[in-house]
Image (spheres, rainbow, N blue to C red):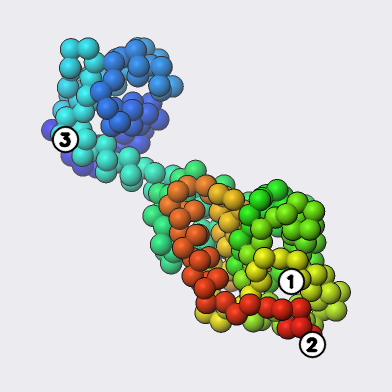
Amino acid sequence: MSRPLDDVAFLARSPNRVAVLRALADGPRSRHELVAETPASRVTVGRILHDFDEREWVTSTGSGYETTTRGRLVARELLALLDRLRAVERLDPVLPWFAVDRIDVPLSAFVDSEVTTPTATDPNRHHRRIGTVGAAADTARMYAQGVTREAIDIHRSAVRDDDQRLELVLTPAALDAVRDDEELRESFRDLVTEAAFVGTVDDPPSVPFLGLFDDRCFVGAVDDPGTFAGVVESDHDAVVDWAVRTLDSLAERAAPLSPADLDP
């Protein structure tokens, strides 16, 4: 019988093994189904099934194969570990600053996330990505520690011209920054007048930016100097559910703003 670390190494060395084990973890499969559902060739599937049988991970059903009790437990634990490691790899560009250990979302939920970061030639790349998705949303819900003129213009147009349903919660510091900038203040005043809800909250969450545009979630990351270092986006159910809970709580606690509140 193999040792645990041998099992990890054996599975991690081959994406085809991972794919076949993941398919079998979902239920019995014939060889033909495994070839159709995975990238592995017929010969490779046969070899993998032989190796799995030697490790007592699968058993023949006559018409196909299914996992043994050992195989089911190994599949559950090893595939979960691989998903977590893949999520770490996905988050790597912002990992030093991303609050993944301070939000109520399993690490594995970020396995298919997308990360957008600024580059030397495109320093606003992450802002533009948020703006593109946010502008097209029927419903936009956001918490932010700051706002830009571009973001205000995007959502002011979306609310006015496309009937976007907007909910925006800011920190008091972000509101002060708006008040101190005359041009920004007047644009924001229009947004407050037209939007469904704009408010401030004193007790912020552990992320600098949280956006939910329809069913796609964006989570911001800020580096040590306090610069917006990038954004992680995901439509995974666990991430979206966490965003809904967080934004619901913020909206309940937020003090609503009126246009008069923007006077310096």
Name the residue beneath numbered marker 1: 192
Specify the amino acid type for callout 3: Arg
Q: Is residue 254 above or below residue 85?
A: below
Label 2 element class: loop
Vertical comparison of 207 with 127: above or below:
below
The Cα–Cα distance between marks 3 and 2, rounded to whole angstroms, is 67 Å
How crowded pointer 3 is (Cα within 10 Å; few <14, some 14-19, many 20+) is rated as few
Q: CA distance from mark 1 to mark 3?
A: 59 Å
Percent from the top left, x then y, of residue 33?
35, 16
The answer to whether any part of residue 184 appears in the image is no
Q: Residue furthest bottom?
A: 264
Q: On residue 264, which mark appears?
A: 2
Pick whichever of labels 1 and 2 is earlier in the sequence: 1
Q: Position of residue 237 (x, y in %)?
A: 45, 48
Q: Residue at x 40, y 49 (%)?
A: 108
Viewport quadrant of the C terminus = bottom right
Q: Which residue is mark 3?
A: 70
Could you classify mark 2 by the number of other residues whose Cα lies within 10 Å: few (under 14), some (14-19), or many (20 or more)?
few
Considering depth in this image, is 132 or 14 the residue closer to the camera? 132
Residue plotted at (30% across, 37% down):
9
Dot 3 falls on a residue whose secondary structure is: helix
The numbered disc on residue 184 is none
Mark 3 vs mark 2: in front: 2
Quadrant of the rendered image containing residue 7: top left
Measured as percent of width and height from the top left, residue 19 is found at 37, 29
Q: Is residue 107 above or below residue 76?
A: below
The residue most toward the left is: 1
The percent coordinates of residue 184 (x first, y second) are 82, 73
- Do residues under tags 1 and 3 come within 8 Å of each other at their CB atoms? no
Looking at marks 3 and 2 on the same chain, the residue that comes earlier in the sequence is marked by 3
Front residue of this view, candidates 14 and 115? 115
Q: Name the amino acid type tagged 2.
A: Pro
